[in-house]
Every structure is written in structure tokens, then in C-alpha cells.
Image (spheres, rainbow, N blue to C red):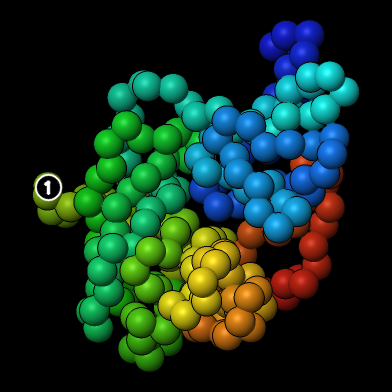
Amino acid sequence: MTLSSKNMKYSNLICLPGQRLCLSDEKTAAGHGTYERKGYIYATLAGSVIIKEKDGCKIIEVQGAGNRTIVPLAGDVVAARVLQVNQRFAKCSIQSIGAHVLDQSYRAMLRREDVRATEKDRVEMYKCYRPGDIILAKVLPRIELSCYELSTAENELGVVVAVASEGGTEEAPMVPISWTEMQCPNTLVKEPRKVAKIVSGSALKSQNNGNFANAK
């Protein structure tokens, strides 16, 4: 952990948009790059989590990677937003590469055969991804100059943030309940997804969530 000033310190956490960071209370508040919802602080950016102290209160912020020009390369893990889905592929927009938030997005395509490593012929795209989902994916070697190709054929790749199609008047990120389903916390409606294997809960407090201890 590196101290940048007397009242600011960097955590070891690299976060993604929509990721839940910690509890919000009278001594912990949301700052730049974060927002508060129902007692928790969430990230709005991909980047490094910064904890600032002011008047006995901790301000949780997210700092992007700056304005360096960076492009996706084969093997990079990226965060992308799903734009359109059909039976053969999903059109996506690459938003960040690792912790680097991009100044401009890049067009990408996730083909049906690259969704998962097994039973590829049984993949139903709309049961894996929906428009608006934020996914973690790996960049494949580029074939077409006009578009990047992505793969989620690993346990650690897939949906990390999704909102229910019918989430009521107040939209809230769904909660993973298995490797193939997410649930709306408001309506309890379940929807199918190809869920990424990530550690949930308060990463700032190093809490280990063992709900998904088993591999897919």
C-alpha cells in the first residue's frame, strides 16, 4: 500500500464498474468514481480504489489509469458492455483494459463458440448475455481489422454486472446465485447468465465469500 499524501492512501484493490466495494455508514462515504446504493458503495469506474480521510470520515474513490493511449492486445482481459445479442454472437463495446479506463471504446464481437469451453454446440446466447451487461472477456488474436474478437471460455470470465429486464421502478445490479443465474434483489426474479467467477463482497475489508467455492 503506497501513501501518496498524509490524508490519502491507495488500496490494493483494482475494481470494475458496478463492483460493490464496501459498506456505507456515517464514517464511510462515496467520493469520485463511486456511488452509494442501499447501504453499500459501488464503483462507477474501472481503476484503483483510493481511501481519503477527512474530518474522521473515510471517502472511497476510484482513480482511473489516466489518459495514456492504449489499445486491446491478444490475451488482454477487458471489461466490455454488451450492446446487441443474437443467436450467433453478441456485439460489445470494450470500455477498459485491466485497470485502464479507455478514452474511447472499441467495437468487439463475442461469438457463440467462444462463450464457454465445453458444450459449445449447446450455447444459447440470450441465456448467457443480455444488452447492457458488463462482462469480463479475453481478447483473441485479431482477424478482422474493423472489430476485436472476445472469448469468455474461462471460469473467471463472463457477466460481472447485470440489471434485471424487469427490475421494478428502481434498477439494482443483480446478484449471482449460481454459475448460470443471477437474481434481482428487488423482485427476486431470476435470469440466466454466464456468470464470471469473481470474489464478491467487501474486498476492502478482505472478506472472503465462499458461496461459489466449486468450479463450474
Q: Quadrant of the N terminus?
A: top right
Q: Residue furthest top?
A: 6
Q: Is residue 141 left or right of residue 207?
A: left
At label 1, which amino acid type do we have? Leu
Q: Is residue 45 left or right of residue 1?
A: left
Q: Nearer the viewer, residue 15 or 167?
A: 167
The residue depicted at 66 percent of the width and 78 percent of the height is 177
The residue depicted at 79 percent of the width and 37 percent of the height is 28
Would residue 109 be seen by someone viewing this image from the given angle? yes
Q: Is residue 19 left or right of residue 167?
A: right
Residue 31, percent from left and from top: 63, 32
Circle 1 crowding by C-alpha within 10 Å: few under 14, some 14–19, many from 20: few
Q: Residue furthest front?
A: 169
> Against 62, is 15 above or below?
below
> Against 48, is 206 above or below?
below
The residue where tag 1 is placed is 145
Q: Is residue 155 left or right of residue 72?
A: right
- Total marks in image: 1
Q: Residue furthest bottom?
A: 122
> Against 4, is 124 above or below?
below
Residue 184, percent from left and from top: 59, 76
Can you tell which quarter of the image residue 91 is in?
bottom left
Would residue 178 be seen by someone viewing this image from the given angle? no
The residue depicted at 36 percent of the width and 21 percent of the height is 68
Residue 30, percent from left and from top: 67, 37
Residue 161, percent from left and from top: 52, 61
Q: Nearer the viewer, residue 83 or 73?
A: 83
The residue depicted at 60 percent of the width and 52 percent of the height is 19
Q: Secondary structure at mark 1?
A: loop
